[in-house]
Amino acid sequence: MAFHNYGPFFFGILCIALVLISDQLTKFGSDISGTMSWAMFSRLQQNMRFSWLSLWRLLDTLFVLL
C-alpha cells in the first residue's frame, strides 16, 4: 500500500547500497590483485552476509515506520 508511494525512495536506497558493496568489492580485488586466499574470501563472504542482513533489518524498520 504505502510501498507504491515510496517505491523510488526504496529503489534509491537499494542502488546506493549496491554501489557501496560493489565499491568495497573492487577495492578488495585491487588490494590482493590475484593472490587471493580462501580465508580472505570466506571473511569477505561473512562481511557481505552481515551487510545484507543489516540492510534488510534497516528496510524492515523503515517499513514498520511507514
Image: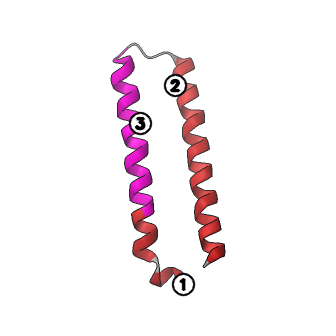
What SS does tag 3 mark? helix
- The answer to if 14 sits in the magenta stretch is yes
- Dominant secondary structure of the magenta stretch? helix
Left or right, 11 with reference to 42: left
What SS does tag 1 mark? helix
Identify the residue shown where x is 39% and y is 65%.
12
Identify the residue shown where x is 40% and y is 34%.
25
The crowding category of the residue bearing disc 3, from other C-alpha atoms within 10 Å (few below 14, some 14 to 19, many at least 20), is some
In whole angstroms, how far apart are the C-alphas of marks 2 and 1?
39 Å
Identify the residue shown where x is 64% and y is 75%.
65
Q: Amino acid at mark 3?
A: Gln
- Using the image as rendered, state which of residue 42 and residue 58 is in the foreground: 58
Q: Residue furthest top?
A: 35
Q: Earlier in the sequence, mark 3 or mark 2?
A: 3
- The answer to if 18 sits in the magenta stretch is yes
Query: Badge 1 is on which residue?
Result: 2
The crowding category of the residue bearing disc 2, from other C-alpha atoms within 10 Å (few below 14, some 14 to 19, many at least 20), is few
Identify the residue shown where x is 43% and y is 43%.
21
Answer with the quarter of the image where residue 32 lies.
top left
Left or right, 54 with reference to 3: right
Q: Position of residue 23 (x, y in %)?
A: 36, 40
Query: Badge 2 is on which residue?
Result: 41
Q: Amino acid at mark 1?
A: Ala
Q: Amino acid at mark 2?
A: Phe
Q: Which mark is residue 24?
A: 3
Residue extent of the magenta highlight = 13-34
